[in-house]
Image (cartoon, rainbow, N blue to C red):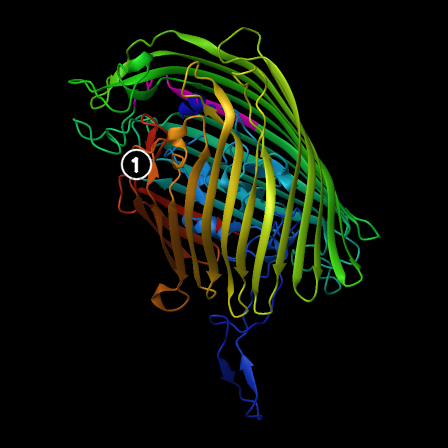
Amino acid sequence: MYGKSFKLWLLSGTVVATVPFLCGMAFAQETTSSDENTVQLDTISVEGQQSGTGPVNGYVATQTTTGMKTDVPITEIPQSVSVIGRDEIDDRKALKLDEVIRYSAGVFAAPYGNDPDTDWFYIRGFNATQTGVFLDNLSLASYAFGGFQIDPFMLERVEILKGPSSALYGGSNPGGLVNMISKRPMDDRFGYVEGGINNFGNAYFAFDINDVFGGRVGGNAGDPDVVGKAAPIAVPDNPVWAYRITGRLAGGDYYTDYGEDLRGTIMPQITYRPSEQTKINVYAQFSALDQTHTGNGFLPYVGTVVPASFGRIARDAFFGEPDLDNGRYTQFLLGYEFEHQFENDWVFKSASRYAYLNKHEIGPYPYGYAPGPFGFGNGFTPVAPDNLLYRIGFEGASGVDAFASDNNLSKKFSTGPVDHDVLVGVDYNLYNLSNLQASGGGTPISATDPIYGAAQGETFVYLDQELTQQQFGAYIQDQMRFGDGWIVTLNGRYDYLDVDSESPASLPFSPNYKSDDTAWTGRAGLGYEFKNGLTPYVSVSSFFNPVIGVSAVDDQGLKPEEGYQYEAGIKYEPTFMDALVTASVFEINRQNVLVADPLPPFLSRQLGEVRVRGFEIEGKANVTRNFRVLASLTVLDQEITEDLDPTLIGNTPMTVPDVLASAWADYKFDAGWLKGVSAGAGVRYIGSSWVDNANTLKVPSATVVDAAIRYDQETWGVALNVSNIFDEVYVSGCQGYSVCGYGDPRTITLSAHYKW
């Protein structure tokens, strides 16, 4: 949405086991053995998860690399972690990142409604869109329009680490981070193609192909099993090379008038493993988008949340200029991941990625009703009889060059009764943004009967910036196990941050400044693993979060936000069922928050503070091999504890609801006339939220129901997914009286796939 400018603000394998299975147990079946006491259990093959970056077994992940940077069980991490695997993504047919994570505890996704070129989300009450996004454990930070977007089809899993994580990842959002884990080449040969279309005419085609070759000495697949007779084509044992190419092309209309897009992404990659101890993967990813924006977002409170004199603004209305409006980007990623295990058992890992983005957007967008005070619109008073919306003309161009690198050593060893898992490393992040933005007076447009084609006013460049941010960090981690169940996790990190902003002209929003800061952050956690799968834990962690901008008080760069979190929780991995439940309570204190002085000369100062206390519970279970469920509940107590405006102290920050809840269940029939049919349904509850920090107006709560039905055979299948099945008309959230966005309408997606 144009409003973003205004805010500025291992390859994985599987194991096969014979296990008892029916809600965790199997019925014993008598055999014909002469021994009447002999029974034989049903034999069921179950895919066991071996990697924290590989496929998830159903809905329940047990391993992760997010939160420790080493492959560990989720129960050992002294913070709450949510993992959404490929099956869960496919079952709900999530086509954007914010759709993937909206069933997770602690996450408020798409707070401003639909935005096709950006994934907006809050974690534990804090906006994580810019400094809370990671790809394969490397930062994918953004600022203003300079943000990258990753298609979920390219991902194996999405992981959410709740709470401050600077001790491992450096500068990042205090509420937590989203770490997207890419698909990687695997030790198998397979192919997959999928196509689909929704009820608005937006269609897509996707493919995913993996192959291996070059087995090492000792392999026998593909060798003649009988002299003179060739064996069937098979996967080489211990393949040296593996490659994978994944892509998706989509385009068509959106639900709002004139909204449309054409987008595509492709990711080729190749893995080389000369020995069991060494592996390197090289990958590239190219993506592009060309769109006419949707009309949703930046709509006034009166006319959306509550009716205006003319009623409510149509959810599918478009208030830009169809012949002028355009948004497009091209982005390119190139990187590698290297791993080597030395003879002394130290493991060295190195990963680096270069990212390039070129983005351009143009067209007017609404901002309250005309004429509005000081040339701006307002969210309260439509002007009769035309009910005119004020519009802001906008054009922006962004160019990004970013580089991220992380290098570490890890080793497991013992000192007496204590087992250690030690990690030491250094990382570096560079983010360079060429940021040009222009604005001007757009012509007003009717909220009820928009007429297009009026000449737009002149725009003026108000920001012309060359921004460079560099961050260097060194970190150490030691996870210690002792006493038959105790786990202690200690982290320490030092960061150096340098920001340089240059402008070729003297413009009101283009300051020249340089700043550098240092930060020490840490994390300490204590847990105990009971034999029954219960792991209670406590932790404390600190953070810093880079803030780009200049203080109006002294023309110096803004200091990073900083603060700390206390968290206590229980993780439960029952022994009788494939499930994981996490419940936690926490308190986050965020300091150095930028706030506006309510008195002349109305300067902004970093004197604000926000405290968030909360409770989260999330459970996922593969109840049986055919029945999968998940549920989550989030309750937040958000409070402004320091502000230059004393009337705001004690109030709740705007936009984020105090209560969020969701649940999803999916069942597959494997017998009878419904064999091959799967059915799923889910419900999302979005609690009420405040429109402003003064807490004068509220956005009411909403409940949205989703559903899916699928039919699968061995090599092919079809699916019908419906989000917002009852077509609930609701406002997702507001950030002020003129910045409200509708939630998505009912969306029906029909798809089919073929695999080999």
- Residue 594 lies, with reference to residue 33, above or below; the image says above
279 and 162: which is toward the camera: 162
| Residue under the image location 50 percent in, 8 percent down | 507
Which residue matches tag 1?
A: 698
Q: In this picture, is 423 found above or below 487? A: above
Q: Is residue 193 visible?
A: yes
- Part of the protein shown in magenta: 319-331
Residue 312 placement, left or right of 756 = left
Q: Quadrant of residue 563?
A: top right
Describe the element under mark 1 as helix, strand or loop: strand
Q: Position of residue 322 (x, y in %)?
A: 33, 19
Q: Could you say where residue 644 lies in the image, as x and y percent from the top left? A: 45, 26
Comparing 86 with 555, the one in front is 555
Q: Is residue 625 toward the left or the right of residue 281 in the image?
A: left
Q: What's under tag 1, amino acid-wise? A: Lys
Give residue 545's position: percent from left, percent from top. 57, 33
The residue at the point 45 percent across, 51 percent down is 615
Q: Is residue 326 magenta?
A: yes
User: What is the quadrant of the N terminus in the image?
Assistant: top left
Q: Quadrant of residue 542?
A: top right
Q: Nearer the viewer, residue 708 or 594?
A: 594
